Amino acid sequence: MSSTAGRWFRYAAIAETISWAGLLIGMFFKYIVVKNDIGVFVFGRVHGAMFVFYLATLLWTARVHRWSFGRLVVGGAASIPPFLGLLFERWVAKRTPDAAPAEAEPATVAAR
């Protein structure tokens, strides 16, 4: 997707995926390694913000590209399991044309 909305949606999907990874690492350290919740405290807030950012750009992109309601619901559901939001973005980017077809230039009529 070469539109502005599509690019921002890609950024949001990447950011949400990275924040998911950080949150999972924080949970690993909290419950397995050091029993300290600082990682979950920090990455939980970051992930919450990135989740909202993902959903906002999802709605924006769906409106710009005129997605069906079903695709919008799948995109929203993809934000819940870890890393699925990025997979959804890659999937939809392959199925969305990069640019609108070039319009034919109007024929110029030479006045004689």
Image (tube, rainbow, N blue to C red):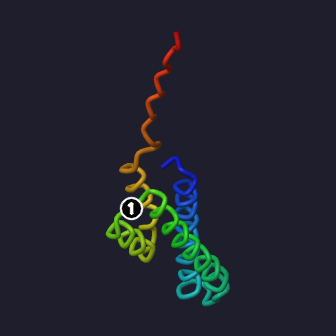
Residue at mark 1: 67
At 45% from the left and 67% from the top, the residue drawn is 83
Residue 75 spot, x, y in % from top left: 40, 68
Residue 97 spot, x, y in % from top left: 41, 45
Q: Is residue 71 left or right of residue 3?
A: left
Total count of labels: 1
Q: Is residue 69 left or right of residue 105?
A: left
Residue 108 spot, x, y in % from top left: 50, 20
Tell which residue pokes out farthest to the top in this image. Answer: 112
Of residue 80 and residue 20, the one placed in the foreground of this image is 80
At 64% from the left and 77% from the top, the residue drawn is 46
Of residue 57 and residue 39, the one placed in the foreground of this image is 57
Of residue 53 and residue 33, the one placed in the foreground of this image is 53
Q: Is residue 62 left or right of residue 7?
A: left
Disc 1 marks which amino acid?
Trp
Residue 2 spot, x, y in % from top left: 52, 47
In the structure shown, which secondary structural element does the residue marked by tag 1 occupy? loop
- Place residue 89 in its image quadrant: bottom left
Of residue 71 and residue 47, the one placed in the foreground of this image is 71
Crowd band around label 1 with a 10 angstrom C-alpha radius: few (<14), some (14–19), many (20+): few
- Place residue 79 in its image quadrant: bottom left
Q: Is residue 64 above or below residue 47?
A: above
Tell which residue pokes out farthest to the left in this image. Answer: 70
